[in-house]
Image (cartoon, rainbow, N blue to C red):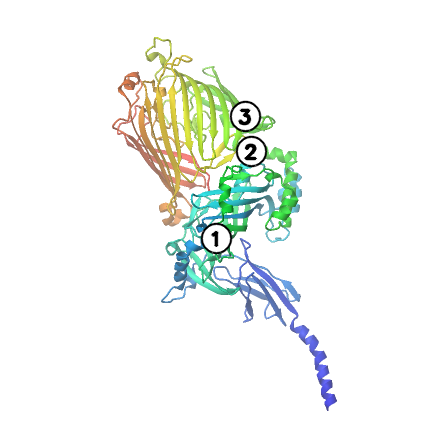
Amino acid sequence: MRTWTKGITLMLTFTGIPMLILAQQFKISGVVRDAHSQEIIPFVTLQFKGTSTGMVSNATGKYLFELNSLPSDSILVRVMGYLTTTLPVDSNKSEQVIDFDITRSDVSLKTHEVKANVNFALILLHQIIRHKPENNYDHFQSYKYEVYNKMELDMKNLNNKLFKNRFTRPFSFILNNIDSTSDDKPFLPMFLSESLSDYYFQRSPKKSKELIKGSRTSGLDNESVSKFLGGMYQNINVYNNFIPVFDKQFASPINNNGAFYYNYQIADTQYVSGHRYIKLNFTPKRKGENTFIGDIWVQDSSYAVQKTTLSVPADANINFVRNLSLVQEFKQLPDSTWFLAKDKFIADFWAPSPKPGSTLEFVGRKTTTYENIVTNDTSVTNIFYNRHYPENIVLLNGATVRKDSFWTHSRHENLSKNEQGIYKMVDTLQKMPLFQHYSNTIRFLATGYKPLGKLEWGPYFYLFSQNRIEGFRLRLDLGTTPKFNKDLYLYGYLAYGFTDKVWKGEMSALWLLKRHPRTYLYAAYTKDFDNGATYYDEVGTDNIFSVAIRKNNVPQKFMMIEEKRVEFFKEYYSGFSNQVALVHRRYNAYTPLPQVNLFPIKKDGTDLFSNMELSLKVRYAWHEEFLEGNFYRVSLGSKYPIVEMKYAVGIPGVMQSGNAYHKLSVTISDYVKIPPLGILYYNFFGGKIFGTLPYQLLEIHPGNEIYYYNKYAFNMMNRYEFLSDQYAGFNIEHTIGNGIFGYIPLIKKLKWRQFWTAKGVIGSLTQQNKNLNLNLGYPFRTLEGNPYMEIGTGIENIFKFLRVDFVWRVTPSSLPDETASRRFGVFGSFKLQF
């Protein structure tokens, strides 16, 4: 009996081995990620469809099923704030990996609302807001960290047919870089940049500095671009009340008035490393506002944000963006305070395609990581007194030519296979003559300039124009390129009028003595008509487009100016710059403007229409940033007001100059972000002229005689309408955003935007200047006791780029003699923006 029992036991032992094996025959694992940001989603509920078999993924988003048999043929994932996602299970595979990429839902939290007497989500929100001062990493008096930035641009919706025609076939090799891990939605990595920096911050007085140790960009070699790809301009901070998204300000989910913008609900609670974390979901209270959809994980003891995922709703008023996600992670330092650990920014862009009914789609990805964090230490503040690093952003020597070994050991995270292939692909493209030809053609159409080796021609829109004095006008512009000299720019144009048969033109030379801070010498000789444009982004009369948009029956005013100019410009790290200029001008007015023979002849042989001027301009623009080209640069503005002062003195008796005077002027301007009410631009200006002068040397308030809106001019004022020798004025523009259009259902879908403008100036003229200028047959007027004011409103973002201004002339009550003068006008302009 005992032997029989042992036999049965032995038999069961051996027969049980395969049974145990069968009990573990199916192993299914994977990870759950956000479909757009590709960020891991922790603590997700997974369940076999139609059964009670399920589990919760861990803190890293991973899961593992070990089953004797498959309960059903598919697994579904449920996460509040995301669409329920179901994927099939292959019953023929004992081991398989199923990764879930789940898509965020726009469904309001009201759908999941549970009625209760107490809203615990709002109580949690109140605690987060209450503890923001100590949890916000910006509360430190000083800090430094090493920041690694990686930016990538990929093309989506690729089709092999794109590379089968004769124009694109030579570039078919780039298909080798298509991401093989995304066969369902393949994309082509096109552009990659990396930067590694040391960033320093001091709160009082507020200072920041970035030392870029390495910068690597595929296909671009521009120092200012390298600086913008550093860490200083990439930061977002969920603790701030508003978060910048392109040029818009979005309300943070933990805004001090967050309950006004969002609905909240507690979605989950989990323990990690002995600490409890609470997941707070949020959705916008109203559609179309600058708000997010997403969630926040909060540590319940400190109420510090551990991670947040922010997505922009589909109905947000942003152009050329289909999807946009922002992810921010924080980590706890040894002293238990919290600091930034990671930023991630993902945006799906689109652009019109040459093929009707289709669009080009791109994905931009930016990942920023922060390491080697030091807070409240003298090693941080000492950098601000180091004379070796005077600029706010310093591109260290050799930063752009780091070897691969530097990046291998220094970058915070490894490059993927596709990312590594981008550098090789772009280098190959850059060496292809056909690619250079295509690039130059696109550049020519976009900018108007065509490179011709050491020279470049353009812009092409100056080539033809027409006016009543010159008739048909032909103009040719030529300038040098860096291939001629990287610090010396020579430029000139030659123009000829087929009616007046007179040659006009310009010759100029710009010598960049130093680029940072900027120092240069400039000299120019010009003989041409004044075309009415003062700033680079104004539309003057000397181009092919202005002919068709002139106001009817307003005679064009012509002033021939022969000018010789020498300038010296010097900029300082503090934001100060000064410019000294010596300018001689000779004027020749054409009817209907008063001509030189109507003015008294001076006995000393000098000429009132000849003038020599020495001027000094001082400018203060703290932390102003620029986008630099080969020789010139475009200001991107400053977070602070910009102040300019100019003093000029007239020198009589030199080169027949007949005018002695002193001029003083000042302007203050700024762009002020006032979320959620948009952006307010203001410019206050004033000046005074001491001396008796002909009209061309007085303040001729800028008018606009074309139907293209001029931001810097009075659009319902004609040129040469008003003269002053003492004046003060303002220019205000408030870009609101959706405005009232956000409350009109049909208009709301068009994503039109609203704004209003107001411009005014008051001035006076001394009796001596009145006697000299107001009785010469031309209807000059003054603003003494009768200021000029115009107000306007309008619609922008029509078809994504068109702006229409409706402008009313409020004062003065009388109008100029021109028959086309009206109190109301409609103006158009182009404004491409996100």
Q: Amino acid at mark 2?
A: Arg
Which residue in the structure is indicated by mark 3? 489
Across and down, in percent, residue 50 comes to 54, 69
| Callout 2 secondary element | helix
Q: Residue at x 47, y 28 (%)?
A: 570
Which residue in the structure is indicated by mark 1? 311
Q: Is residue 358 visible?
A: no
Mark 3 or mark 2, whichever is nearer to me: 3
Across and down, in percent, residue 40 comes to 55, 58
Q: Amino acid at mark 3?
A: Tyr
Q: Which mark is residue 443?
A: 2
| Callout 1 secondary element | strand
**Left or right placement of residue 811 versus residue 208 in this view:** left
Classed neighbour count for the residue bearing mark 1: other residues with Cα under 10 Å, few (<14), some (14–19), many (≥20): many
Q: Quadrant of the N terminus?
A: bottom right
Q: Which mark is residue 370?
A: none
Q: CA distance from mark 3 to mark 2?
A: 19 Å
